[in-house]
Amino acid sequence: MAALFKSGRSDHLDSESGTVRYNYHAHAIFLNYDFKRKVTPLGNLQRTDFSKQQDYLAKVMKGAGFRRGRGKSETAAEHRDKTEYVAHKLKKF
């Protein structure tokens, strides 16, 4: 399984303070096919496996100033599809 790591930055205007907030982040993109064994290994992973990977990466990257985002269990946030997310954000303006 191959992985591509990409870093990025997304900025947004804090509506309360009027300042720009920077969100530095990283993405790990996996090729979900093992050509030798002809299987899709990510299909065997559970949601908790991905959470554990994020916890581990947060520990590794802490020295570089990265911090782990808060999980759904903490925020009680529900996933929105793109259309719902954009509509919600536009209501704030």
Image (spheres, rainbow, N blue to C red):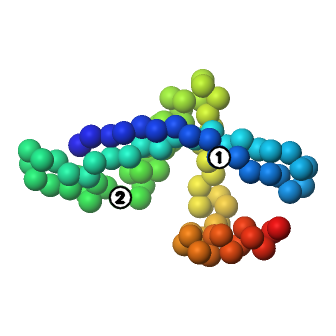
Kindly state the secondary structure of the residue where label 2 is placed: loop
Residue visible at 47% across and 50% down? 51
Q: Report the residue marked by disc 1.
A: 10
CB atoms of marks 2 and 1 within 8 Å: no
Left or right of 36 on screen, residue 11 = right
Q: Nearer the viewer, residue 36 or 62?
A: 36
Which residue in the rendered view is the most extreme toward the top? 63
Q: Residue at x 60, y 25 (%)?
A: 64
Q: Quadrant of the C terminus?
A: bottom right
Q: Residue 85 at x, y = what percent?
A: 63, 70
Q: Quadrant of the N terminus?
A: top left
Residue 75, quarter of picture: bottom right
Crowding around mark 1 (Cα neighbors within 10 Å: few <14, some 14 to 19, many 20+) is few
Q: Is residue 4 left or right of residue 22?
A: left
Q: Is residue 36 above or below residue 40?
A: above
- Pick whichever of labels 2 and 1 is earlier in the sequence: 1
Q: Position of residue 70 (x, y in %)?
A: 63, 51
Residue under the point 72% across and 67% down:
89
Q: How many marks?
A: 2
Labels 2, 1: front one: 1
Give the residue pinned by disc 2.
Answer: 46
Q: What is the CA distance from the residue labelled 2 to the residue labelled 1?
A: 28 Å
The amino acid type found where label 2 is placed reads Gln
